Image (cartoon, rainbow, N blue to C red):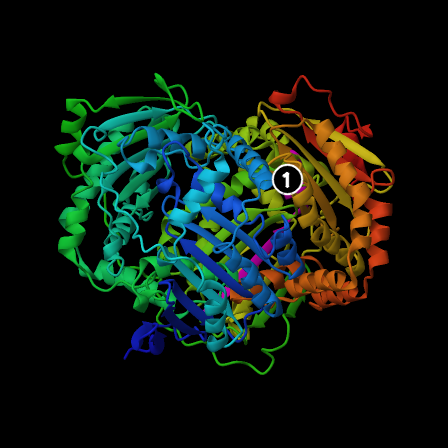
């Protein structure tokens, strides 16, 4: 038996049997699969080290099952199950319990599945399962809650009216086979969920629930530190009473696309300035082939970004910016395979040529790409990922396992996502045959095209035109393009996979092993996560990079140009399990590498060589500049609450300007300015490097020499760049309004700590934790002010911060401000009404969240790196915050609310957006308006 296989007992009631189950050698969890008497499929996962316990239940019901006259019903039902059960009738009680237990929860409704999941501290798991199990045995569907929650569903629908993803998705629904359930409106609104014809929506909701929520169509995953026997007892106690109707999931009798809907050119007008061309090919479901993954092979070939690839050739011709292959919707009786390309302006004028090039590359794969070594290479990458897989959060683990439970054989629930059981050329060729012009739907989402129809629900302009005979002939009768090449064997595949032996000091926190003028080197060999992986951070601070908005934009331009130059050569490294990123920040630029450590020096060498041989090609510069301008201008179409968050950080952090400032600076920058700028930037720099994971100290020091040579570090006297932050101090209430075209209004209130002590961090973090559930329940569930309602903990430049926010389709900023003020005025009473047990449970829940151990090497690396950036060089701040939390009492928090948060005494920044639907309402006039950003930012330090 291979090393990656273990034998695990699989029990089935009333029979018990043993089945082989593939488990990663790096996975120390224990698994048990069983079927309850009501035919509920259950996977139990024992993880002795799990910081939290988690559960997920998925039912094979989705919006495909909505009644034709009650579209959105499955989604509405998902909302309602959280709002009271026979044993726990109080609305919002489940969310309060989750919050006090240091947990989180969510749910989603898809086409053919609805999935619910939560996690809590282990001691609260049994009660959590008792509450959760009631969703599926005894929901109340309280009439008042029904009426209010359909308002929430309507708000969720309206929230996305200007979301191009939803708008394009609706056109997709309207242009496929009208008999297929994919065409249904998945979200629902007040018109589809109204009371009608002497029948209430509640009656229809109950009927839908009783008909479809059946144990034989469900899967359940329980994960915790509890023993498998204990978890099994939980499964019986809380889920064996779920009703089993015995009805099987009905087959879908009609295809997604018929001959009538194929061979169509569909043009769609987006709100944002995007240019996206998608070739879509429909085929039968390929779920049965998950063990072989033939479409992964095809997507791997078409989506290659290396030299001579389809993407490389089309980019060199200045027709596209990006390409991806293998996406598309899928269901129980169909699979859509898409090739999506983001076009340049030139590409927009040559869409037929681009399509022809795609079919030329498909032909190349058919003629020369059917080689078993390519499949084996892809397989080996997946095997390495499985062999050295790292833990994920319990909530994430149960969320993906519950879907596997319903789609894979019991043997493959753990391994199914990674397995490639064997090269099957006839099968791959059969699927490639679907990628032909006669089976294609070509979708162009771009402004300024031809549209003669309007989609329902999202009012999206579009048109549908059949392919011409000439197009079909051009795309069918193709010749070989000599520029097209298939990929070579991957030089970045790792061979030395045994982690290095641990050095004596490996259990210590990161150590500063070089502290030189202009260069600091931190190092830690990882001792817990014994995987052959590493993470490298290189932060390059330069005052010149950030001393004006113009220079900030130049820095971002240089980053994008370097990433573009690296991409083609570094793509094989990404395929082989490594990743890299280069990003601008408030002090300069950071380079990050992660993944398998053996070939990280090779990848670093490649990146540094690209930097050393940098060129500033005018055509590439113009293309990148145009992309950046388009992306930043498109931000004006983002949701109002997203725009407020962007403006907030732009106001408070001068080195992180908002989009309008960036746009103004970028418009006048020429390529000729960049070479001199880069030289000036690197003439005054400071580098902080952190090498972590499966690295030896001597190799780390050698890498440091390479970095110092590359960046010409020679006893520089420059320190880190300053990261200024505007201090609100005793400002009272400040207000700042932004304008836009969105119908919804939005508001955001920000409170800032002047101090950065562990105690202040504890106070602000606990305030957010205590307020979040009550704020959501009062302003969303009860008052129905909007779908996006919440609180957030937002530290900026080490200063703790608290945010309260709402986006609303029904109220303007004035009413939203009054509602928040009413809440904050009353919240101190809410704290006083908590009994001692509830108070301690809330504190312990937060402490459990903060104390949660790192789940994997990458998350630990990120925590260490944040500590280095925050000057927490003893890596003890988390411990200090926990101690401060333990020492906080209720009087401390009441004092915080009264003195810091209450409107009468608050020093706060109120950001607001008056939506187009509320232009006739009185505007918000509160506190002191910020009229000059320049003057406001003079307080930054």
| Residue 691 visible in the snapshot | yes
Furthest-bottom residue in view?
504
> With respect to residue 259, does 515 lie above or below?
below
Task: Examine the structure image and report whether residue 359 is included in the region drawn in magenta.
Answer: no
Stretch in magenta:
533-551
> With respect to residue 29, does 932 lie above or below?
above
Rendered location of residue 235, percent (x, y): 46, 67
Task: Examine the structure image and report whether residue 535 is included in the region drawn in magenta.
Answer: yes
893 displayed left or right of 805? right
Location of the C terminus by quadrant is top right
Rendered location of residue 405, percent (x, y): 36, 61
Say which residue appears at 35% left-offset and 55% top-offset.
572
Say which residue appears at 33% left-offset and 47% top-offset.
305
Say which residue appears at 83% left-offset and 42% top-offset.
902
Residue denoted by label 1: 780
Report helix, strand or loop for mark 1: helix
623 displayed left or right of 650? left
| Residue 873 visible in the snapshot | no
Q: Quadrant of residue 389?
A: bottom left
> With respect to residue 734, does 453 lie above or below?
above
Rendered location of residue 727, percent (x, y): 80, 43
Say which residue appears at 21% left-offset and 63% top-offset.
422
The residue lying toward the viewer, choosing from 35 and 211, is 211
548 displayed left or right of 138? right
How crowded pointer 1 is (Cα within 10 Å; few <14, some 14-19, many 20+) is rated as many
The residue lying toward the viewer, choosing from 191 and 910, is 191
Location of the N terminus by quadrant is bottom left
């Amino acid at each position: 038996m291979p090393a990656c296989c273990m034998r695990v007992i699989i029990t089935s009631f009333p029979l018990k049997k043993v089945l082989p189950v593939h488990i990663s050698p790096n996975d120390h969890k224990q698994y048990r699969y069983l079927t309850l008497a009501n035919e509920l499929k259950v996977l139990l996962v024992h993880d002795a080290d799990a910081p939290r316990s988690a559960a997920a239940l998925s039912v094979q019901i989705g919006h495909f099952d909505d009644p034709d006259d009650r579209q959105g019903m499955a989604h509405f039902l998902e909302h309602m199950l959280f709002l009271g059960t026979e044993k726990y009738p109080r609305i919002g009680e489940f969310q309060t319990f989750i919050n006090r237990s240091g947990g989180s929860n969510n749910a989603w409704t898809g086409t053919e599945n609805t999935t619910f999941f939560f996690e809590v501290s282990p001691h609260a798991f049994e009660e959590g399962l008792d509450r959760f199990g009631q969703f599926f045995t005894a929901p109340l569907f309280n009439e008042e809650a029904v009426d209010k929650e359909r308002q929430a569903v309507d708000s969720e629908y309206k929230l996305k009216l200007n979301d191009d993803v939803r708008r394009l998705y609706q056109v997709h629904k309207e242009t496929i086979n009208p008999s297929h359930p994919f065409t249904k409106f998945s979200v629902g609104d007040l018109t589809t969920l109204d009371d009608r014809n002497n029948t209430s929506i509640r009656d229809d909701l109950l009927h839908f629930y009783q008909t479809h929520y059946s144990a034989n169509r469900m899967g359940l995953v329980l994960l915790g530190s509890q023993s498998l026997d204990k978890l099994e007892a939980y499964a019986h106690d809380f889920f064996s009473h779920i009703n089993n109707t015995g009805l099987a999931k009905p087959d879908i009798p009609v295809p997604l696309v018929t001959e009538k809907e194929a061979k169509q050119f569909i043009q769609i007008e987006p709100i944002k300035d995007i240019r996206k061309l998608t070739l879509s090919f429909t085929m039968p479901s390929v779920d049965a082939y998950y063990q072989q993954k033939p479409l992964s092979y095809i997507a791997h070939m078409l989506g290659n970004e290396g030299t001579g690839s389809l993407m490389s050739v089309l980019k060199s011709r200045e027709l596209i910016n990006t390409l991806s292959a293998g996406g598309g919707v899928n269901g129980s009786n169909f699979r859509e395979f898409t090739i999506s390309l983001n076009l340049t302006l030139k590409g927009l004028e040559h869409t037929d040529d681009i399509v022809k090039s795609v079919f030329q590359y498909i032909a190349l794969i058919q003629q020369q790409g059917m080689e078993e070594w390519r499949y084996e290479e892809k397989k080996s990458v997946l095997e390495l990922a499985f062999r050295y897989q790292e833990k994920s959060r319990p909530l994430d683990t149960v969320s993906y396992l519950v879907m596997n439970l319903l789609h894979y054989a019991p043997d493959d629930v753990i391994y199914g996502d990674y397995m490639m059981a064997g090269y099957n050329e006839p099968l791959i060729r059969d699927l490639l045959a679907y990628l032909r012009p006669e089976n294609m739907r070509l979708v162009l989402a771009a402004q300024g095209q031809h549209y003669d129809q309007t989609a329902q629900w999202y009012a999206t302009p579009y048109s549908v035109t059949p392919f011409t005979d000439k197009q079909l002939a051009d795309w069918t009768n193709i010749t070989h393009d000599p520029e097209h090449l298939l990929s070579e064997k991957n030089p970045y595949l790792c061979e030395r996979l045994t982690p290095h032996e641990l050095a004596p000091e490996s259990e210590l926190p990161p150590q500063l092993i070089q502290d030189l003028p202009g260069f600091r080197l931190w190092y830690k060999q990882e001792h817990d996560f014994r995987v052959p992986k590493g993470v490298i951070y290189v932060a390059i601070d330069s005052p010149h990079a950030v001393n004006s908005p113009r220079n900030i934009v130049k820095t971002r331009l240089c980053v994008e140009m370097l990433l573009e130059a690296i991409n083609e050569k570094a793509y094989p490294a990404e395929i082989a399990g490594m990743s890299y990123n280069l990003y601008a920040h408030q002090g300069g630029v950071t380079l990050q590498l992660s993944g398998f450590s053996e070939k990280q020096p090779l990848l670093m060498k490649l990146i540094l060589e690209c930097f050393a041989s940098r060129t500033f090609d005018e055509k590439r510069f113009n293309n990148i500049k145009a992309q950046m301008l388009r992306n930043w201008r498109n931000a004006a179409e983002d949701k109002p609450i997203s725009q407020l968050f962007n403006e907030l950080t732009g106001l408070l952090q001068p080195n992180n300007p908002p989009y309008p400032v960036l746009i103004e600076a970028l418009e006048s920058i020429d390529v000729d300015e960049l070479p001199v700028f880069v030289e000036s930037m690197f003439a005054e720099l400071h580098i902080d490097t952190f090498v972590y994971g499966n690295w030896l100290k001597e190799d780390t020091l050698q890498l440091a020499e390479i970095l110092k040579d590359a960046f010409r570090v020679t006893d520089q006297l420059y320190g880190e760049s300053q990261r200024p932050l505007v201090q609100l101090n005793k400002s009272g209430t400040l207000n700042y309004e932004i304008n836009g075209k969105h119908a919804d209004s939005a508001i955001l209130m920000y409170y800032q700590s002047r101090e950065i002590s562990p105690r202040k961090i504890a106070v602000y973090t606990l305030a957010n934790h205590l307020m979040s559930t009550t704020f959501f329940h009062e302003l969303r569930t009860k008052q129905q002010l909007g779908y996006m309602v919440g609180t957030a903990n937002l530290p900026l430049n080490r200063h703790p911060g608290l945010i309260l926010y709402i986006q609303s389709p029904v109220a303007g900023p004035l009413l939203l401000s009054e509602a928040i003020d009413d809440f904050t005025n009353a919240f101190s009473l809410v704290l006083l009404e908590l009994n001692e047990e509830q108070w301690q449970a809330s504190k312990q829940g937060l402490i459990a969240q903060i104390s949660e151990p790192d789940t994997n090497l990458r998350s630990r690396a990120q925590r260490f790196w944040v500590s280095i950036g925050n000057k927490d060089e003893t890596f003890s701040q988390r411990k200090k915050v926990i101690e401060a939390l333990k020492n906080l009492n209720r009087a401390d928090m009441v004092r915080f609310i009264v003195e810091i948060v209450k409107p009468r005494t608050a020093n706060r920044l109120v950001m607001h957006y008056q939506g187009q639907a509320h232009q006739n309402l009185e505007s918000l006039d509160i506190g002191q308006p910020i009229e000059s950003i320049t003057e406001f930012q003079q307080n930054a330090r």
